[in-house]
Image: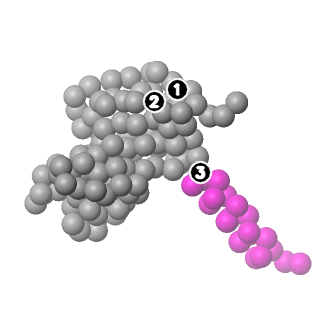
Amino acid sequence: MAADGSVLFSDEELSEISGLKKGSNFVEVMCGCTSRRYGDAVGRLRVFASGDLEINCECTPGCDEAKLTPAAFEKHSERETARKWKSNVWVIVKGEKVPLSKTALLKYYNKASKTANGSHQRCEWASMSPR
Ligand SMILES: [Zn+2]
């Protein structure tokens, strides 16, 4: 059975996150990024089972930025490179802005990047070991 958006996260992990929608293989929530100069930019964040994160920007009615990575969204909304999207991009939980790093939404992303690091480390270790 293919991964279903409704089983990616438990109800508890997603409870009270604003704008929650469950797709066939992703969940979608409202997200945003606050710029000191430009104020809040909002968008729709999709979290896929593969760990991919995708943001469709809605900062202005005319904005057609879609399929942004969180880092690109942060750059787009801040117009500067802060590169701390995990703490700068937020979702709304119980009416409060909560950084992505403090939600369960990154668990697939973290898992995917951990796997990538793991194999990289194994390669390095193998090349460094005596023959
Ligand atoms: Zn935008």
Residue sitting at 70 percent across and 30 percent down? 1
* 45 relative position to 10: left or right: left
Query: Quadrant of the rendered structure where residue 103 is?
Result: top left
Q: Where residue 76 sits: x, y (%)?
A: 26, 62
- In the image, taking residue 129 as reference, residue 28 lies left or right, namely left
* Residue identifier under label 1: 6
- Is the C-beta separation of discs 2 and 1 under 8 Å? yes
* Residue at 77%, 76% in the rendered image: 127
Q: Circle 3 — which element?
A: helix
Pointer 1 or 3: first along the chain: 1
Q: Magenta segment, which residues?
A: 113-131
What residue is pinned by disc 3? 112
Pick whichever of labels 3 and 2 is earlier in the sequence: 2
The amino acid pointed to by label 2 is: Lys
Q: Distance between the residues labelled 1 and 3?
A: 20 Å
Q: In this view, does 117 lie above or below 1?
A: below
Q: What residue type is labelled 3?
A: Ala
Callout 1 amino acid: Ser
